[in-house]
Image: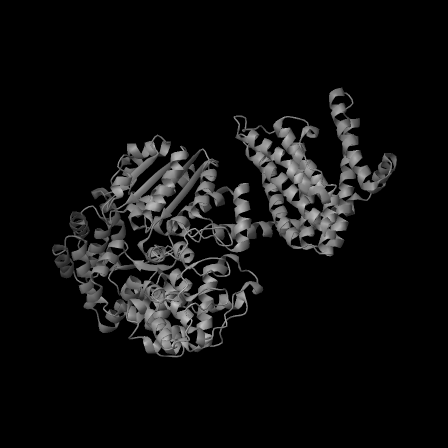
Amino acid sequence: MAEAMGLAASVIALAETTRRTIRYLQGVKNACADSQNILREVINVSVLLTNLETKAQDRLEEKWAYSMKLLADDVFVDLSRLMSELISKLEGRSPHQHLGISMRDPENASDSLTDNFFSRMKCRLFMSSKYRKLTWPFTSVETEGMLAKIERYKSLLQLGLANDQLSLSQEIQSNVKHVKADVQRVLSEIKGMQHNQQSLKIQATEIKESVVDIRKFTRTQSWVVQKQIEIEMSQTQPIRAGNTDIHKASRNQEIQFWDDYCQRLSQWLSPLNFWSKQTDTFSRWQEGTGSWLLENAQFQEWLRGSRQTLYCPGIPGSGKTVLASMVINHIETTLGSQKDIGLMFAYCNYKEQTQQTALNLVSSMMKQLVTRSWLLTDELMEMFTKHSNTQTRLPIRECIQLLKAQVARYSRVYIVIDALDECGEKDSLMLAIHGIIREAKNASLLVTSREIGNLWELFRDTARVEIRASDTDIRTFLRSQLEKKPRLQVHFKKDPELLPFVIDTIASKANGMFLLAQLHMDTVAAKHSLKQIREALTSLPDGLTATYDVAMERIQAQVKEDFDLANNVLTWVTCAIRPLTVQELQHALAVEIDSNSLDREGIFEAESLVNVCAGLVAVDGESNQIRLVHYTAQEYFNRNVNRFFPDANIRIANTCITYLSFDEFSTGCCTSVEDLNKRLEDNPLLTYASHYWGKHARLGSELLLQSKINQFLNTEANVSAALQAVRQGMYDSDYATEENNIKTFNYQSENRIFVAAFAGLGSTVEWEISNSGAEMDCNIRDSVGRSILSLAAETGSEQVCSLLLSRPEIEADSKDDNGKTPLGWAAEDGQEEIVRLLLARPDVDPDHKDLEGKTPL
């Protein structure tokens, strides 16, 4: 056991040396292709060692220790020497001056870790000094030699990871032959370089060092080694052919491993991906519009870095989001090819406030910088290893610090945040961003927003450029869009004067808003005759509210089938908790209440969903989400929800419960990730329904739905399937790639109070408690030690939490198996009201630390 632990320590020591080498390589100024190639390959080695380090700490059995010893006796020594040589040459001194770690005695490697503290400190002081920009000291030939060595070491490390002892032994012997071949090559070069005495001395020194290595491998006299080399050189061709195949396979494995690592790292950093939103939004940009912003003097100063912050407020519908996408595209196309230019951006959305937390937004920006170059810092890799093992996320403070380090790697970083007014945690987000740009003078921030609330105070002293659609841009937009209206084109051909009349009339009514111009154009385009078109143009309403009223009048005037479909579409799109995909909405509208299955012949075509809504909904092509045409449309329907959708949440909850009760899910949990993914793909509404059926029920009328809820909670297999869809979506989308990682649930109806609490159903929880008599234990725990209060606190159900906290026997500060309290769950999920409720109690400790050492706040 002691030897195995020593071997594990030797891996840790080598991993640290490799990470130190990466820091040096990243300090090379004007990095050439050679230095970048070495850096990339050393990062690959570091990833393999990090993985080996994790496994070595967990696997101490004899078989694994033997594989590790094979590596320690050969590869670790050579690899450590190579890393030392890299650092030494970069520092401008001889390799023997470097403070390295001996790998020959793995049992004492832990002592080497302590001794190496001074070496690490020296490295950090060196890299933080004014001389941290290093020059590349190696020739192309030397670089090629190092790349070949690293390639061999990677192959051996991968075999070690696979615990393939036979192949590992064979490859190590092959590695010895490569070293011998290198010596023969050096000897030949020396014979041809006798005219250069200085070069001869340098080469002779290298030969002596290589011969010493060979003596260690073979334990023979040097003249015997030379004879062996001469014999083996005649056999190099078949050996090289075999090695080529091995290296190809090894390279493919390495690429796959690296791709998997990068994908897991990217998913861990943030669930948000704004590139699809960028693609969707920029596709709506009309060529020839918005150039006034790019030519604006203050924007040009911001682009050059003369101004660090540019605030771009605008009225609703003025095209702020599309202009933000134009700015992002401009930076990407004009400056994106420069490797020292970074770009981060975020599109805030009123419908996604739950997911777009300050933490997720900041970590999404860091993900954009990381995936731009994939040059990973030691700190980021260490954090990823630490948190992925426990399936936890970065706290926002650590995330900000890591982002500052990433920003410092670029000469300039542009940050674009659109629709800040739609962000639910705007104050926390801007506090984080301002903290970054205050320290990073190379960061430039551009923000678009409606100027509401106290936003103007955040940008009181910054440069401002107001966003307003110019008359020229609106006319350019209208001319292009009208060409795509076939019904109008017929009339334009009959009356050449009609097109300019339509453009002039709509432009005069647009009032600086592309949105209003678009809605007016949709109104006109719906007309059939020339007379109807002229009448519509003379009666166009002023302002967005009146325009939305007219659009709803058009919807209500449709035939019953079209009106019913439009009403259902608008009900779901307006009242859904989060944005829906087209497939989710198609399944929702095809559900027949109280049926046992989905009749797929009842699924509506996506085009029909849009066409019946009078231009009030749109589909984003990249994300395939169906949405209201603008935030102001959401506000309009929120003000008029009782007028247009009086029973929306009851209808949605009823649909979700019916869907979850389908026979399709009566088999309970899936037992493999493959089966679960297929279930989610075949039943696209399952994820949404599993997450939000309870929330819609309590927003509507839990009492009216009580019978339906009780019936569902008694179907054990269906509830288990729903719980699996919820938990798998919350955690395993980032981590589960193997069948044994899938979460399964064995729900029993007697545990229905846990599900009711998680769903936030206060009336159901109260009924369960009151009908269970005196023996009801409000502090009962589930399989992972979580109490009813803990589940209710996570989902933010104030009614359930208040009910439970009113009971004298409640344990308000109960700890689950991870040591997390209800306050910890509420704080982590941003449930402010629940946090206030719990902090008001004297029996709740806000400074309690869970098993990860984190306090709730």
Is residue 390 placed above or below 695 in the rendered structure? above
Total labels: the figure holds 0
Is residue 503 placed above or below 677 in the rendered structure? above
Q: Is residue 202 visible?
A: yes
| Near-viewer residue (644 or 131) | 131
Residue drawn at the location 64% of the way across and 44% of the way down:
12
Q: Is residue 605 visible?
A: no
| Near-viewer residue (406 or 784) | 784
In terms of image quadrants, where is residue 209? top right
Is residue 818 placed above or below 748 in the rendered structure? above
* 8 to the left or right of 439: right
| Near-viewer residue (831 or 727) | 831
Q: Position of residue 426 (x, y in %)?
A: 32, 47
Q: Position of residue 677 (x, y in %)?
A: 49, 65
Q: Position of residue 428 (x, y in %)?
A: 35, 46
* 643 to the left or right of 416: left
* 338 to the left or right of 47: left
Figure coloring? one colour
* 803 to the left or right of 73: left
Q: Position of residue 788 (x, y in %)?
A: 41, 66
| Near-viewer residue (666 or 677) | 666
